[in-house]
Amino acid sequence: MFVQTPKFIQALFPSLIWRKETKNKEVWLTFDDGPAPEITPWILAVLKKENVKATFFLVGEQIEQYPKLVADIINEGHSIANHSYSHKNGWLTSKKKYIADVKKCQELMPKNSLFRPPYGKITKAQISVLKAKYKIILWDVLGWDFLQNTTPEKIKKNILNNTKAGSIIVLHNNQKSFKNLQPILAETIQILKEAGFSFSVTW
Ligand SMILES: [Zn+2]
């Protein structure tokens, strides 16, 4: 995997959204997984303090477990989106099961029109069904916050070195990534703001 998705992979999947076209100096900050107790409230507090908005790709099973956290995300002005019901790997799941899993999550957020495949792993057959109903959102800047053998400083540098106007940045709203995210989230946002970036949730 790569911090930035190589052009040749992007070209293989033209119906997926890897970056946003924009004339403005803006980025799309996204958090995958969750909602998760302790982690989600902490992320929300940082975003509030920095006065930026983000899009949360939530997992249906966890939405059912933590509805209050979902309400908090929405009440703070952020967007929520579909990250499947049970976080299945599309490469290892039949089309029928995969589509049903996405639909089950969608029933928990009827107004949503965005989907992000867990692990970024989705087949052409699954895409061909889902693209009729969803914008399928990938990313061009992967934070690597889920890696266990990295440092927060490296994650921060990865993000800052690769973000440009229109970038979709992915970080994680889960326990595994928290130790990497916690030391650098606020500072990374501050540096991007100082560089003139604004944060959009308009897809
Ligand atoms: Zn995920």
Image (cartoon, grey):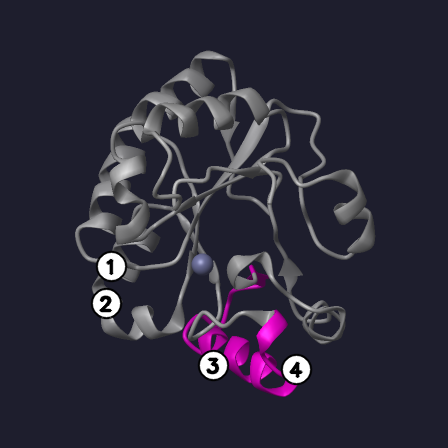
Q: Is residue 196 above or below residue 167?
A: above
Is disc 4's CB within 8 Å of ligand 1?
A: no
Q: Which numbered disc flags the more N-terminal residue, 3 or 1?
A: 1
- Residue at image position (56%, 59%) is 116
Q: Name the amino acid type tagged 4.
A: Lys
Marks 4/3: CA–CA distance: 14 Å
Q: Name the amino acid type tagged 2.
A: Tyr
Q: Where are the magenta residues, as a range?
A: 91-116
- Residue at image position (45%, 75%) is 105
- Residue at image position (50%, 22%) is 160
Task: Find disc 4 in the rendering and name its residue.
Answer: 95
Task: Find disc 3 in the rendering and name its residue.
Answer: 104
User: Is the residue marked by circle 4 packed among few (<14), some (14-19), or many (20+) residues within 10 Å?
Assistant: some
Q: Name the amino acid type tagged 3.
A: Lys
Q: Is residue 188 above or below residue 73?
A: above
Q: Quadrant of ligand 1?
A: bottom left
Task: Find disc 2 in the rendering and name its residue.
Answer: 66
Marks 3/1: CA–CA distance: 19 Å
